[in-house]
Amino acid sequence: NAGVTQTPKFQVLKTGQSMTLQCAQDMNHNSMYWYRQDPGMGLRLIYYSASEGTTDKGEVPNGYNVSRLNKREFSLRLESAAPSQTSVYFCASMRGPQDEQYFGPGTRLTVT
Amino acid sequence: QKEVEQNSGPLSVPEGAIASLNCTYSDRGSQSFFWYRQYSGKSPELIMFIYSNGDKEDGRFTAQLNKASQYVSLLIRDSQPSDSATYLCAAPNTGFQKLVFGTGTRLLVSP
């Protein structure tokens, strides 16, 4: 039981490049989330998927797209990376309303 | 916007003391509350949850909930240097299937 896994762990991009961050969970959770966390800051929700087949914007969706591929997998895409997207990205999953979230180990992204 | 608020700290306590971390929330529909610990460079890790008014104890940790005052706290007894981390409080945003996180309180436990 791996919980929530994320790939890659580290990535360096040049401005304008694109990439997809992958997230998978094996806990049969309904909801999945993408957050970013900047140094000394709290978690900011980018996008979430309350259930398979649905996605919704969070606080900071600009510059990102998401795909809920199936119940297990939720990917985050940066179409044209910008230095302002340098951050640590966390994926999380949750079984249902009023439940706790479980986090993946994070992806450390640097955009130069 | 439904909010969860915490004092950012740092909260400094000596080893062996009790650390008290506090959190207030605005969504009266929230029924469950969570405390996460986040070490520098790591992901948040769930350490306590509480659903009912009153206290819930787990080892050196005690979570306290007062729904009337919309207040949640975490007490860490016999604080250890290894408890030095950022502690995040979270509550459900009812109707939207997501958690609202506070910005976290940084705890420093000195030997």
Image: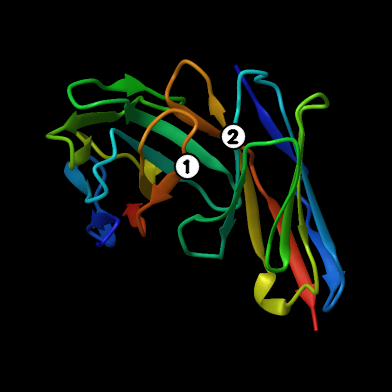
**Observer able to see residue A27:** yes
Q: Can you identify the residue that label 2 sits on?
A: B32
Image coordinates of residue B24 in percent, x first then y, are 75, 33
Image coordinates of residue A102 in percent, x first then y, are 40, 49
Label disc, if present, on residue B34 of the rendered structure = none
Is disc 2 placed on a helix, strand or loop?
loop
The image quarter containing residue B85 is bottom right
3D distance between C-alphas at marks 1 and 2: 9 Å
Picture layout, residue B53 above or below residue B84: above
Is disc 1 placed on a helix, strand or loop?
loop
Asked if the residue at tag 2 contacts the one at tag 1, i.e. Cβ–Cβ closer than 8 Å, the answer is: yes
Residue located farthest toward the left when viewing the structure as drawn: A69
Residue ID at (22%, 30%): A66
Name the subunit of mark 2.
Answer: B
Q: Which of B83 and A8 is in front in this view?
A: B83
Q: Can you identify the residue that label 1 sits on?
A: A100
**Observer able to see residue A87:** no
Q: Label 2 is placed on what type of residue?
A: Ser
Left or right, A104 with respect to B47, comes to left
Left or right, B16 with respect to A96, comes to right
Residue ID at (17%, 36%): A71
- Marks 1 and 2 on same chain: no
Name the subunit of mark 1.
Answer: A
Picture layout, residue A10 above or below residue A46: below
